[in-house]
Amino acid sequence: MRQPVLFVGHGSPMNAIEDNAFRREWQRLGQLLPRPRAILVVSAHWETQGVAVTASAQPRTIHDFGGFPPELHAAQYPAPGDPALALRVAELLAPETVVQDSRWGLDHGAWSVLLPMFPAADIPVVQLSLARDHDGPWHYNLAQRLAPLRDEGVLILASGDMVHNLALLRWPLDKAEPWAERMQTQFNQWLVAGDHVPLQHVDRLGHEARLAIPTPEHYLPLLYALALQTDEDELSLFNDTVLGSLSMTSVLLQTKTTQSFRQAI
């Protein structure tokens, strides 16, 4: 069965342990989607010079944040790695050089989502880094080479936020900034229409897009999901909420076969 593809708006690391609607939706997906043999994560929180994958057999849980309660810092996600999958990713991305990295682990862009989704931590996880200094089309084209993994039992999970401007985040978060809501609405329209061209060129979209994406690292994982969309996939949005200047909007791509599997459950 071809694996689905996810882009998850991960938001605050606290979503890993708080009981809220976002976490509950991640839990629901983990229960309904077909179990993968392995997971490849593209997280906003691992940027490198060039491309790298985690090659450790036991990646560490990285607490790459500060100022949160001890319960969050104590959280662990001891999923095994998959060195063979890391080598397979390098094979698929050739001739791009892919460093086999044994030092990085699972950052909060990965484990904060996986902890609710697959709490047993018994599915191997590999992370793919975001190469700095490349534009949207470069990342989109690179990601297309990963397509065979879907038929090899690998769930590809991209983790970031389409709208992510922490400098303009104002409390309380129950009201979306008007510009953030407009940009997310525009993104959603392109997503539903399957129009990937403007989504690859957000740097050309003007002032409100620059407010929504002041730096690219939280947006670029979206392109890794969209690049794997086929004519057989149907796209659905979930957690479609804007919190101030941060969006939680997420994307599920699944074939009709996978949808039938979910309906049967």
Image: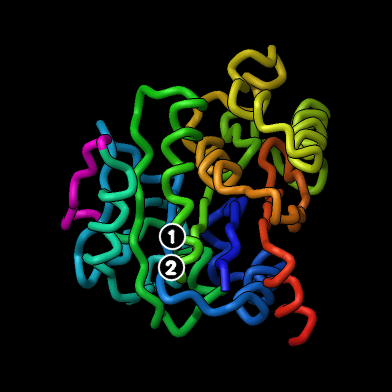
Image quadrant where one finds the C terminus? bottom right
Which residue is depicted at the point 74% across and 53% down? Answer: 235
Which residue is depicted at the point 69% across and 63% down? Answer: 255
Residue 66 position within the rendered picture, expressed as x and y whole percent measured from the top left: 40, 51
- Kindly identify which residue carries mark 1: 149
Which residue is depicted at the point 59% across and 78% down? Answer: 34
Left or right position of 158 against 208: left
Q: Is the magenta stretch mostly helix, strand or loop?
A: loop
The magenta stretch is: 95-104
Q: Can residue 172 be seen by looking at this rendering?
A: no
Residue 231 position within the rendered picture, expressed as x and y whole percent measured from the top left: 70, 49
Q: Can residue 194 be seen by looking at this rendering?
A: yes
Left or right position of 172 against 47: right
Left or right position of 194 against 47: right
| Circle 2 SS class | helix
Kind of residue sitting beneath label 2: Glu
- Kindly identify which residue carries mark 2: 152
Dividing the picture into quadrants, the one containing residue 44 is: top left
